[in-house]
Amino acid sequence: MGIITVAGAGVMASALSFPARDNGHEVRLVGTPLDREIIENCRKNGWHITLKRQLPDGICYFQFEEFEDAVRGADLLICGVSSFGVEWFLGEVLPVIPDSLPVLSVTKGMLDTPEGGLISYPEYYESKLPGRRISLNAIGGPCTSYELADRRHSAVFFCGRDITVLRRLKSMLETDYYHISLSTDVHGIECAVALKNAYALAVTLAVGMAERECGEGCGLHYNPQAALFGQSIREMRRLLKVFGCPEDNIIPGAGDLYVTIYGGRTRRLGTLLGRGMPFEKAMGSLEGVTLESVVITRRTASALKKRIGKGLASAADFPLLLHIDDIISNGAVADIPWKSFETEVF
């Protein structure tokens, strides 16, 4: 059995302790400076205050100043930060680990470039670590932390550049409920699963719009949600092509979109916006909540607009994304451009 160190005690990284411990590995959970209360409580009784689950027995807990002890002798380092912690992980964690220690990141998101491109976080880390040979890998696909911690069947992708490393990581974490496919297409997988956050926000506008019409607590209107889901898949496929990704990556992206629209922070924001609440007011009501959907929408729209300006893409192909960006960036009221979704096929 191996030693798995987890840097960041967020819900998804902590949920990975379940398959890790079920496979008999030693798990060392290290909090970031923002996770002190989580680690302190876990040390007392093993209860994770944000995952709201009892973590498996046998986990060792560390505050970040103890990171060097926690990573000593490790066989795998799991990066457990959100996209808001990427720079912290780059500056505080990666410089102090050996090149021989593979990294597996749970962070979903992309960065837009001045040229109108999108790059994944593993690619970004590589660009900032010239001369280093760390194996930087990531997890993508439809898996909520709560259901993973409850040992519900979940199917994900591990992506990285070295298939041999990926197979080793799979052997460490795969269980009879945690199913892992492998891909060396880091850019494609990461792009697809990042885009789902923007489009989950778009689909859940329909929930709020139904409540605007019929009142909160009314029956859900599934036709509008289904229509927005279909348009989201259409635009996500087009975006994958625009940003140089094989279109087959729509599979993990679509699965991730499906699971995201059914709950969590993105659904809450989309519902508020669909009711007609201005973006700034909606954000104020969700103060303190990490909203990856807002970040990826802005970054994707920024990159896309640069491509459109260069004649490399057409705004007419992305009406839903651009409407969401208009809501977020310009304070527009949710008003789905339904007519622009209609097509003729010959």
Image (cartoon, grey):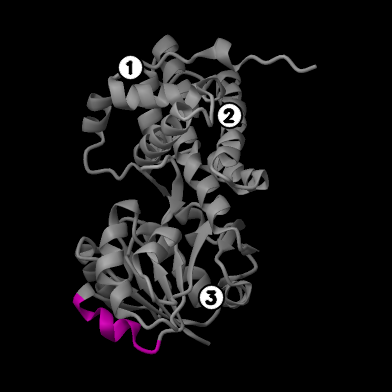
Q: What stretch is highlighted in magenta?
A: 65-73
Residue 276, placed above or below residue 264: above
Q: Is residue 106 visible?
A: no
Give me the C-alpha separation between circle 3 and circle 1.
48 Å
Task: Name the quadrant containing residue 122.
Answer: bottom left
Give me the C-alpha separation between circle 1 and circle 2.
21 Å
Q: Can residue 184 be seen in this view?
A: yes
Q: Residue at image x 26%, y 32%?
A: 283
Specify the label residue 129 is tagged with. none
Q: Which percent across, then down, holds residue 1?
A: 53, 87
Instruction: Tell me the SS state at disc 1.
Output: loop
- The residue that disc 1 covers is 332
In the figure, is residue 74 to the left or right of 221?
left
- The residue that disc 3 covers is 22
Pointer 1 and pointer 2: residues touching (CB < 8 Å)? Answer: no
Magenta-span inclusion, residue 27: no
Type of amino acid at the residue the image marks with label 3: Asp
- The residue that disc 2 covers is 229
Q: Residue at image x 49%, y 33%?
A: 199
- Sequence-wise first label, 2 or 3: 3
